[in-house]
Amino acid sequence: MKGKVAVVTGGSRGIGFAAARRFLAEGVHVAVADVRDDMADHLCLVGQKAGARALFIRTDVAVLPQVREAGRKVLESFGRLDIWVNNAGWDRVTPFLSTVPADWEKVLGINLMGVIHGTLVALEAMIDGKEGGSIVNLGSDAGRVGSSGEAVYSAAKGGVIAFTKAIAREVAQHGIRVNCLCPGPTDTPFISENFGTRDGEKVIEAIKRGIPFRRLGKPEEIAAAIRFLASDEASYITGQVLSVNGGLNMPG
């Protein structure tokens, strides 16, 4: 992995941060495309220890021109692109009938269109580079089995799964692999933001009881799977959907 170049969208916290840190620790140059830069200094230090560079690019993945500009800066800074992780996501857990069109547009803009935008920019660079590459899209088990209070989010993530399979077929001839990773409930800021109340804590405890391992996932555990799918160790894997969820759901 050392010396490769990766882009991680939404890499400033949670799963994206864990993935960016994992890549940097292995000597992968990483560009974080995010609307926030909370952990940029920390990632730079991690990269320095491993001889890798970390670059922060302020990017709203729902806006295609901003994603294109991020891609341009990556090529300008590193001269190549090997890995693109479409991780950025957002949701607010609430019953569908309590949501409004602005909510739907934001959820779809970040979770589905953000993946489409990132994939477009990544493919253009990878095909021009003629050295193949790997794209890892972050789906969700919500997109495989549905999730109460996350109807539009579930629809968006279901779209990510189908999009991943279609693109994998289209670009295999270029040596580019495209896979989808579906995390289950993971201990990230998303959990605290949506379930930080006393009632929310009860919901989380109920979820834990339904997970065979009886706990939430750790961002580092998801990052390990992202790293695998992005690496040459997964050189014969494309168009696949991998759930990392402690056994909560076991879709066929």
Image (cartoon, helix red, strand yellow):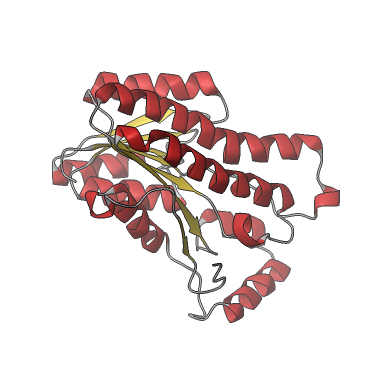
In-front residue for pair 142/56 = 142
In-front residue for pair 138/54 = 138
Q: Quadrant of the C terminus?
A: bottom right
Residue 223 lies in quadrant: bottom left
Residue 32 lies in quadrant: top left
Residue 126 appears left or right of 164: left
So how many labels did they put on this image? 0
Q: Is residue 187 above or below residue 68?
A: below
Residue 148 pos. (x, y %): 73, 61
Residue at point 38% right, 63% down?
A: 221
Residue at point 79% right, 36% down?
A: 101
In-front residue for pair 49/118 = 118
Residue 145 appears left or right of 99: left
Residue found farthest to the right: 97
Residue 131 lies in quadrant: top left
Residue at point 42% right, 59% down?
A: 219
Residue 197 pos. (x, y %): 69, 64
Residue 194 pos. (x, y %): 65, 57
Residue at point 60% right, 58% down?
A: 144
